[in-house]
Structures are given as structure tokens and as C-alpha cells.
Image: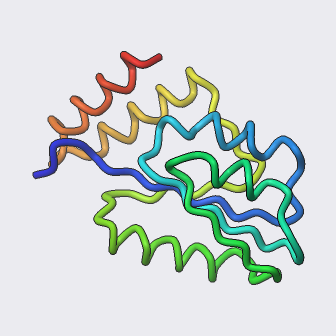
Amino acid sequence: MPDSLKIAGVVILYHPSEDVVSNIKTYYDWLDKIYVFDNTKGDSYVKGTLEGLSKIEFFQNGDNYGIAKNLNKAVRFAIKENFDWMLTMDQDTIFQKMLSRITLGVFITMQIRKWWPCLEHLMLILKKM
């Protein structure tokens, strides 16, 4: 059994607003890695900022491949990297502290067979808040 739960995230972008970086930062600390796929044609103005964050793996598609193709890619990457869970967000997703605590609590209660490692992981996260 793992010492703690490894959680990856994926965000699919398409013509993201300037808020997307601050949106991602609201859940950045909750995840071990975030795969970001930008489906915008041409260069992405958020690429440099996001690539500067150590947990971000950024992919510039240069065309709109939609959501499913990139979600499948992210899941394959996460499986190869031994993540336990994949959290999917869109570019407008924002975590609020209390909602995040409640969501994580529900998530943990659903993982009975991994209860103790999850509890330990939760306690570490809550101590950071």
C-alpha cells in the first residue's frame, strides 16, 4: 500500500483568459502533477508562466483537438507515472479552501481500502492551510 495517495490533474485550455494561471494556482498545491493541454492555435501566452511551475507538464497542441483526446493522453501519462487518481478540470475551475476540504474529505471516505494513507495525506495537506 502506498505511503500517500498520488493525485494528478489535467486541464484542457482553449483561448484561455488571463485568469487561467490564477485559477490553476488555486488547486496547484493539492495535486502532485498537472498536465495542461492548450488547444489554442498559435503560441500560448500562458505557456511561459505555467512551465515555470514545477508540477506542470505543458503541451501546446497548436490546434483544437477537443477534450477527449487530451484527457485520454493525460490518463495514459498518469498511469505510466503510477498516479492513483486523476482530477479533471476546465480552464475556469477554481478551488475554494472550504469546498476543497469538504471534497477531499468525501473523496477520502470513499477510499476505505486506502483509509490510513489517505488520512495521513489529508493531515499533511490540512496542516499547510
> Where does residue 96 sit, x and y in percent of width and height?
63, 27
- Please give the count of numbered marks on the rendered protein: 0
Q: In percent of the image, x 57 and y 38: which residue is there?
A: 27
In this view, the residue farthest toward the left is 1
> Where does residue 44 sit, x and y in percent of width and height?
83, 64
Asked where in the image residue 58 lies, by quadrant, the reply is bottom right
Asked where in the image residue 51 lies, by quadrant, the reply is bottom right
> Where does residue 127 sit, x and y in percent of width and height?
36, 16
Depth check, front residue: 45 or 1: 45
Q: Is 53 placed left or right of 60 in the picture? A: left
Depth check, front residue: 83 or 51: 51
Does residue 24 lie above or below 80 as drawn?
A: above
Depth check, front residue: 47 or 88: 47
Depth check, front residue: 77 or 43: 43
Q: Is 108 placed left or right of 4 in the picture? A: right
Q: In percent of the image, x 73 and y 48: which residue is there?
A: 49
> Where does residue 5 sit, x and y in percent of width and height?
28, 46
Does residue 82 lie above or below 19 as drawn?
A: below
